[in-house]
Image: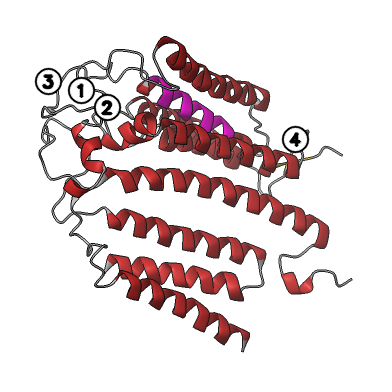
Amino acid sequence: MLQIAAIALIVLGLYGILTQRNIIKIILSLNVMEIGINLFIISVGFVEGGLAPIFTSDNASSTLNFVDPLPQALVLTAIVIGVGTTALGLALAKNIYSKYGTFELDEMGEE
Amino acid sequence: MKNFLALVLALGLGVMIYLTLNNNSLFNDYGDAVIEDRVSNEYIDRSVDGNTEEVIFGESEGLESGPANTVTAIVADYRSFDTLGEVTVLFVSSLGVALLLGATKQKRYNFDFHPNFMLRTGSRALFGIILMTGIYIAIHGHLTPGGGFPGGAMIASSMLLLYLADDQFRAKIKGFKMLESIAGSLYVLIGIVGLLAATYFLENFLDTGVIGNLFSAGIIPIVYVLIGLKVGSEVSGIVDNFLTEEAV
């Protein structure tokens, strides 16, 4: 069920990128798509009734039923890179706004 | 018409992903992942180098990777080189933002309202608490959920609070640039020390101690705190770039 929700988010993001004509909305769609993909990657490592992969005084042994830590580590990387690309995209959007006075792609170039 | 085509394309992709993964013998259903078959099992057992003993919290000593948090063990130890590349990507993106928005800006954007005494004092009181929580999360990254990246993001969010609550406030951005360069260089230097003192780049050359102690896991807490400082100063620099303009 969670994986279907993640695929739905990916589809929603792709639809937004293809149809929106506003730069901010395009960047938002990219972020929705990224969240969908991250959710999907994490869901791949889930085990029914699994524990978070952290040793504590309650869950003290490596023989316990932990969930897969590798997708979580990969998603940590993906989130940070998503922040970087979003910041770069917003900086580009700000420059475009100061030049054309609008975020709408259709209204650019008309004086 | 164009919207309809886009809808068909997006839905087609979604259905394709679903059909490929549904009833696929190579892809387990949600919740049925078998960790024993995966490489992650060796990360949990700390048995990449052939350790066969059970790992016990607070007792196991001198493991190949010391953090109690297995995700930290992967991010900052097994895949540390990958994390160095990731930090570089964040550095390049903050460099790109500074290049696009102009790095020599001196003036803050003016707000439509003037922050009153309560807002300024309250935000400064909250600033300390958020900053301390961020540093705590970065330091305890090898024991509890969290680590350098969330901790750095919290440090940057405390700076963002000051920026939003007071339109006269401006951080000493040169200090941030210095801190960021020092933290990044130290990360690479620690890696080179691993290469010289031991056998390969970013090898853990310190004693890993007892799993679960604050002073354990060798270089991993040091590296993660450096990452936290670097991420915090980089994101603070991005915030400053977005909220300032060139002086006329």
Residue located at (22% from left, 22% from top): B63
How many angstroms separate mark 2 from mark 3 (CA)? 13 Å
Q: Secondary structure at mark 1?
A: loop
User: Crowding near pointer 2: few (<14 within 10 Å), some, many (20+)?
Assistant: many
Q: Specify the farthest residue to the right.
A: A111
> Which residue type carries mark 3?
Glu
Residue interval drawn in magenta: B222-234
- Give the quadrant of residue B55: top left
Amino acid of disc 2 = Pro
Q: Nearer the viewer, mark 2 or mark 4?
A: 2
The reply to whether discs 2 and 1 touch (Cβ–Cβ < 8 Å) is: yes
Quarter of the N terminus of chain B within the rendering? bottom right
Q: Chain of mark 4?
A: B
Give x and y (percent) for residue B245. Answer: 76, 41
Q: Earlier in the sequence, mark 4 or mark 1?
A: 4
CA separation, marks 3 and 1?
7 Å
Q: Tell us which disc is closer to us: 3 or 4.
A: 3
For the residue labelled by badge 3, is the local secondary structure a helix, a strand or a loop? loop
- B217 up-or-down from A57: above or below: above
> Mark 4 and mark 1, same subunit?
yes
Q: Is residue B92 left or right of residue A2?
A: right
- B12 shown above or below A67: below
Count of marks placed on residues: 4
